Amino acid sequence: MNNKLKELLKEKNIIHLNYVDNWGKAVEIASEPLIKDGSIEKSYVDKMKESEIKNGTYIVLTDYFALMHTRPEDGVNKMFMSLLTLNKPVNMEGKEVKIFLVLAAKDNSSHIEALSNITELLMDEDKFDIFLNGEKEEILELIN
């Protein structure tokens, strides 16, 4: 697999927690590594949350998985990804979510290969279970 995901989702950007109080807090925690390394601005996090409230749960792509993103002009400085996995799901407008993948894309096309990589992993039930279990080392092994 030509793995763009490997370039964009680094170990330092993967967080695993037992539980968070709400989906907004989950988005903030998932975004922290990208804010810290300058990939995104705090405004990007605010816009992701606003978009979810305004547009509904279109970002929950499959059971337990949310692909958090918004428009590049809302605060993306460089393309990167971060991941938060939870032991206990959080309610996101009526849907249970345990995996929050934050995508910071600089344009409408450069991230497509990485999304294809992640989709390929999530379509495989055994690999999806590894993401659900949240073991950082196992997730990194899958990505690499």
Image (cartoon, grey):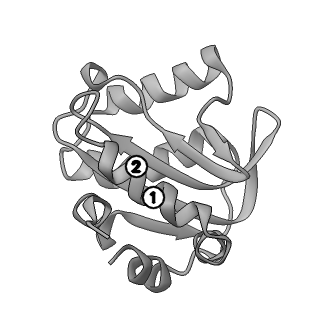
Against 19, residue 95 (above or below) is above
- Residue receiving disc 2: 115
Separation of disc 2 and disc 1 at Cα?
5 Å
Dot 2 and dot 1 residues touching (CB under 8 Å):
yes
In the displayed image of the protein, which residue is found farthest to the top?
A: 54
Quarter of the image for residue 22 reads top right
Give the SS element for disc 1. Answer: helix
Against 142, residue 78 (above or below) is above
Quarter of the image for residue 77 reads top left
- Residue 99 lies, in percent from the top left, at 60, 57
Q: Is residue 43 left or right of residue 95?
A: left
Q: Is residue 11 left or right of residue 127?
A: left
- Residue receiving disc 1: 118
Q: Is residue 92 left or right of residue 16?
A: right
Question: Looking at the image, which residue is at 53% across and 70% down?
Answer: 16
In-front residue for pair 111/59 = 111
Q: Badge 1 local density, few (<14 within 10 Å), some, or many (20+)? A: some
In-front residue for pair 102/62 = 62
Residue type indicated by callout 2:
Leu
In-front residue for pair 33/62 = 62
Which mark is on residue 79?
Answer: none
- Residue 34 lies, in percent from the top left, at 29, 49
Against 129, residue 71 (above or below) is above
Residue type indicated by callout 1:
Ile
- Residue 90 lies, in percent from the top left, at 73, 50
Give the SS element for disc 2. Answer: helix
Question: Looking at the image, which residue is at 53% across and 20% down?
Answer: 50
Q: Is residue 95 left or right of residue 141?
A: right
Question: Looking at the image, which residue is at 65% across and 78% down?
Answer: 126
- Residue 107 lies, in percent from the top left, at 23, 28
In the displayed image of the protein, which residue is found farthest to the right?
A: 94
